[in-house]
Image (cartoon, rainbow, N blue to C red):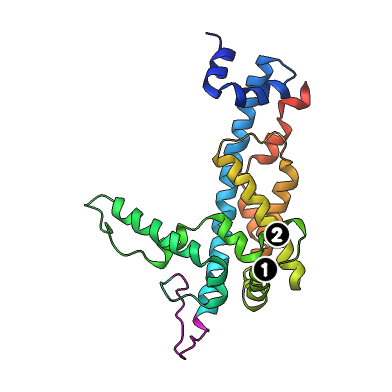
Amino acid sequence: MSSENALLELLGSARHQTYIDAAAGNPQRAAELYEWSNKLAGAWHSHIAYVEVAVRNAIDRQLCTWNASQVRPDGTPYSGDWTRANGTAEEIYTIIGRSISEAHASAANEARRRPASHPRHDTSPTHDDVVAQMTFGLWTRLVLHPPEFSGSSPGRTGVKQRDLWRKCLYLAFPGAPKGDTGRIKTGRQLEGIRRIRNRIAHHDNLLKIDTTARLNGSLTLLKYINPDFPNLVMAHNTLRRLVKEDPRIHW
């Protein structure tokens, strides 16, 4: 079996056809393009790991501080652990309450799956355990109501996102433009990263992704958090090199 036929069998006809079409029917070029696309996905995966951790930590810090400043209807204060059961201030809970519960369940399952010899086998999840189980989409939804991605007016939850940004989340992105413009721009950058992340997770092709534009957008997002982050993250990044190595440039 030739390497081109082996690739067809490995990918399946539908996925393989995408590369055949992009290579104008040339199986060898399709194989070359798939190899390049795979390297591109790997480089994006590495880059997004930095972005996701930076976003998660920046938002979590501000939510912890703000949640601890809030008071329940009975007058008792909330703690800094905004993920604690019955410990989430209403503005946060309205937006992501169900997702917090799901993250708790995932963290508990993770603890049960640890080997019996593990010192934290079947232990109660900590705040950090729960936060680690939260999806990238959760951070996006905290900033921007999904209809706003396309310019629609926010609904009731959109109002909550606007309020939460004004009260605390703007502090997670101190370099963002002031006011609601900063929230919209930050949210749309987050959503762009989330979509690429999902394509990579499902092994979808990145052939129509404008990597240079998306990379620059992600660096702007990092700069919103800390102006030192872009240089740190790009020190060993290979995305710009891979853009130049796109085999379609030379066909």
Residue 77 in the image: above or below residue 251:
below
Residue 206 in view of the camera: yes
Residue 224 in the image: above or below residue 65:
above
Residue 10 in the image: above or below residue 66:
above
- Name the quadrant containing residue 187: bottom right
Look at the magenta stretch and give its main secondary structure.
loop
Q: Give residue 106's mark.
A: none
Residue nearest the viewer, comparing 42 with 126: 126
Dot 1: what SS? helix
Find out whether residue 21 is within the magenta segment: no
Q: Which residues are magenta?
A: 68-83
Q: Disc 2 to disc 1, how far (Cα)?
A: 9 Å
**Dot 1 crowding, Cα within 10 Å, few <14, some 14–19, many 20+:** many
Q: Residue at x 60, y 37 (%)?
A: 41
**Dot 2 crowding, Cα within 10 Å, few <14, some 14–19, many 20+:** few
Residue 130 location (% of width, % of height)? 43, 62
Residue 222 location (% of width, % of height)? 65, 58
Q: Give residue 158's mark.
A: 1
Q: Give residue 147's mark.
A: 2
Labels 2 and 1: the sequence-earlier one: 2
Q: Residue at x 57, y 75 (%)?
A: 91
Q: Which quadrant does the C terminus fall into?
A: top right
Contact check, label 2 and label 1, Cβ < 8 Å: yes
Residue nearest the viewer, comparing 106 with 44: 106
